Image: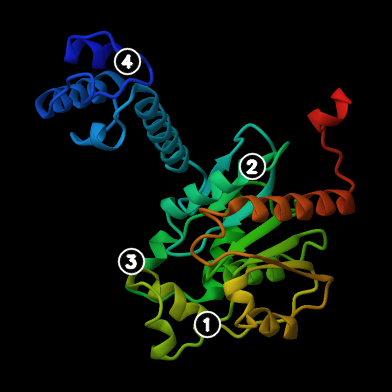
Amino acid sequence: MTVLSSVVGNAMGVYDDFWQAGGDSLQAVDAASQLARNLSIRLPATVLLKYPTAAQLAERVRRLQQRRSFFGLLRSATATPCLVTALNQHSSPELAVLPGGSGGEAEMVAFVRLLQAIPALEGVIGFRATHFQHSDRLASVEQIAGIYQDALRHRGLADQPLLFIGECIAGVIAFELVRRRCVESDRLVLLDARLPRADGNDIRKYPRRCRNYVRAAGNYLPGICHNDVDIIQSSEFAARNSAKQWLLYLRGQVKNHVVAATHDSYIRKDAQPIAAILQECLMQWRNKIGKAIHMPWRSAA
């Protein structure tokens, strides 16, 4: 607010419009430059066109700073380049996340925002698959899962029960990882996950940056998994009956959940229903392994 007032030359309130207060395009560029320099963030020169009040601008800056902190955390040094601490780095991990899409940082950030809606969540680790996208050699699902398993072993988590969440194409990797770990108390959540076909027509439906990943999943021959599994689908995916193919390979308890959303929106825009289901899955898994978690709202009752 101080920067906007000094640039315009008039005292501005939190909800005063920069343009209505007499600001012009040159002053807007100057204000954006000062804010970016003072806060050490990147702001486009046109930011005041979309966020003309101090309140709107402050919220935009807060989100940019939050996003930067997410990326900084995801780039932090860990035992292996594919395994990162995604949330609550000082707590023991209980969730392991495999994002869909290209499996990179942007997908991980979307997942972190989703998981922040779950109360009393302990440590969350995540797997990045970006380096497989640019590899000249096509890694198989088994190879990728083996690398992830080694990363967990290196982190001291070889036998620790975890709740794995695999989204979209990464659900195939999560399935194989849980299956080969043979930890009875592991639980798997598949989010809009399906087994793609290896033919060119199916692969071309995916963005180019994901096609190596999809090709590996298309060549995968699943084995039997004896762990409990939750299959969560958007209504768009449920209409394709994508869950049916997984049932051939599952021997543990299987629960199906459907949320009214599209595949593109169910995590990013309509995330609250998914967060509620994930919280339920988490509580059931904790109860099964006998894990007591302090719940703040219970102690206040």
Write down the residue under mark 4: 1
- Quadrant holding the C terminus: top right
**Label 4 to label 1: alpha-carbon separation:** 52 Å
**Mark 4 is on which residue type?**
Met
**Mark 3 is on which residue type?**
His
- Residue 230 placed where, x, y %? 74, 66
**Label 2 to label 1: alpha-carbon separation:** 30 Å
**Label 3 to label 2: alpha-carbon separation:** 33 Å
**Label 3 to label 4: alpha-carbon separation:** 45 Å
**Which is more foreground, mark 3 or mark 2?**
2
**Label 4 to label 2: alpha-carbon separation:** 30 Å
Q: Is residue 2 above or below residue 131?
A: above
Evaluate whether residue 276 shows in this view: yes
Q: Quadrant of residue 116?
A: top right
Kindly identify which numbered label has been placed on residue 269. Answer: none
- Residue 218 placed where, x, y %? 50, 83
Instruction: Check whether the beta carbons of the residues at disc 3 and disc 2 lie within 8 A of each other.
Output: no
**Mark 1 is on which residue type?**
Pro
**Mark 2 is on which residue type?**
Ala
**Label 1 to label 3: alpha-carbon separation:** 20 Å
Q: Quadrant of residue 55?
A: top left
Using a 10 Å C-alpha cutoff, classify the residue at mark 2 as few (fewer than 14 neighbours), some (14 to 19) or many (20 or more).
Answer: some
Q: Is residue 273 above or below residue 29?
A: below
Kindly identify which numbered label has been placed on residue 117. Answer: 2
Write down the residue under mark 3: 134
Instruction: Check whether the beta carbons of the residues at disc 2 and disc 1 lie within 8 A of each other.
Output: no
Evaluate whether residue 43 shows in this view: no
Q: Quadrant of residue 13?
A: top left
Residue positioned 78% across, 62% down in the render: 183
Write down the residue under mark 1: 196
Of the numbered discs 3 and 2, the one sitting upstream in the chain is: 2
Using a 10 Å C-alpha cutoff, classify the residue at mark 3 as few (fewer than 14 neighbours), some (14 to 19) or many (20 or more).
Answer: few
